[in-house]
Structures are given as structure tokens and as C-alpha cells.
Image: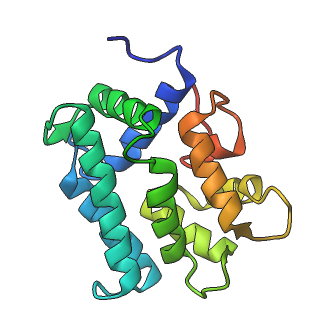
Amino acid sequence: MTDGADDPIAVKLGYLFGASDTDRDGFVDWNDYERLIGRYLSGYGIVAEDRRAHALRAAYRMYWSELLRQVNGIDRLSKEQFVVANKAAGADRSRFTMADVVPQAVFDVMDADADDAISKPEYKVFLQAWGVSDLEALNVFLELDTDDDGRISRGEFIGAIRDFFTSPELDSPASLFFGHIER
């Protein structure tokens, strides 16, 4: 297998791998997602018993199960395996669509005031959970707010996630979730 240096989607998935490897051990496993879920819940002040917390955990569990299915059940993924599994999961629309399940649950957690839109402060908490700096958070927010209304709608957010996993453009708003990507 190649390192994906010429494949823009592989490059983006490599950035996602780096952000998902919350303990920085060079692998992604379920414990990394548990830490990420904990960051979301803590950042937004959501208790574990809240329906949004249950939906978020279930969505990430489905995502993780699908990644494992794509690599024959390995319980932790190297960067290369993570990229391959995400690409395969994205191509196989018969069982799971990453760009629909997880982003819906994440959006519901992010929308702390339940106004069906993400404000700058709400988005900043999201990016802090992923370890992205404040300056980058503002720049990414402005890029994702495609209609310039000062908020990220559910449609803008879901569309951006979908584009992250499918668009070969490295400088599109959707490619900026973890900051500007460099080859």
C-alpha cells in the first residue's frame, strides 16, 4: 500500500487519524473515541445520561464497528489501516454512511442552545475537543458558514463532513476541520 501522499482524501484522513489518536500512541482504538466523546460531553456540559450523550456514543460505536469490519476486526488501527478502513467505509453505502450518522449526533451535541445552528462559541468547543487552536477555530467557522449568516446550519455542517470524506479539494471549507492541510 502507498502512504497516500498523492491522494487528497488519504491526506485528509491522515489528519483525521492524528486528531483521533487522542493518546498519541500511533494507533486509533475505541479508547481514543471514548476520550473524544468525553471531551465533547465535558466541553458542552452534557451529562452521560443525556439522550445526546447516548446518541453520540452509539453513533461513534457504529462508526468504529464499521471501520473494524473494513479491516477484518483488528481492534486498533494504524494510520494506514485507518485511512484504508475509512475509504472503504465511505465507498460501501450498503451498510453505513459515516457522513450521515456521526455528524447528526455531533451536531446535536454542539447545538447547546438547541436553535438548530452552531454559533462561534459552540464551534470553538467542538474544535477544542479535537485539539484545534482558537485562531484556526475562527477561520474554520468562517469558511464553513457558507451563507455568511454568522451560524453554521445543520445542512452546512453535515455537508462539510460529507465533503471532508469525499472531496479531493484540500483547500475547500470541508477540508479545514483540523486546520489548513499541507501536503
Which image quarter holds the C terminus?
top right
Extreme residue in the right direction: 148
Quarter of the view holding residue 72: top left
Residue 90, how many percent across, how many down? 45, 37
Q: Quadrant of the N terminus?
A: top left
122, above or below 89, in the image = below
Q: Residue furthest front?
A: 94
Q: Residue at x 62, y 42 (%)?
A: 163
Q: Which residue is drawn at 75% across and 71% down?
A: 151
Say if 108 sits above or below 47 in the image: above
Q: Position of residue 78 (x, y in %)?
A: 24, 32
Observer able to see residue 82: yes
Question: Which one is in front, 16 or 179?
Answer: 16
| Quarter of the image where one finds residue 115 | bottom right
- Which color scheme does this rendered protein use? rainbow
**Viewer-proximal residue, 38 or 162?**
162
Nearest the eye: 60 or 148: 60
Q: In this view, does 45 lie to the left or right of 174?
A: left
Q: Percent from the top left, x then y, of residue 44?
A: 46, 81
Query: Is 74 above or below relative to 144?
Result: above
Q: Quadrant of residue 180?
A: top right
Q: In this view, does 158 lie to the left or right of 77?
A: right
Residue 42 visible to an observer of this rendering:
no
Q: Which residue is drawn at 27% across and 28% down?
A: 81
In the rendered view, tell whether residue 66 sits above or below residue 36: above
Q: Where is residue 22 in the image (x, y as percent from the top left)?
A: 29, 52
Q: Residue at x 48, y 64 (%)?
A: 128
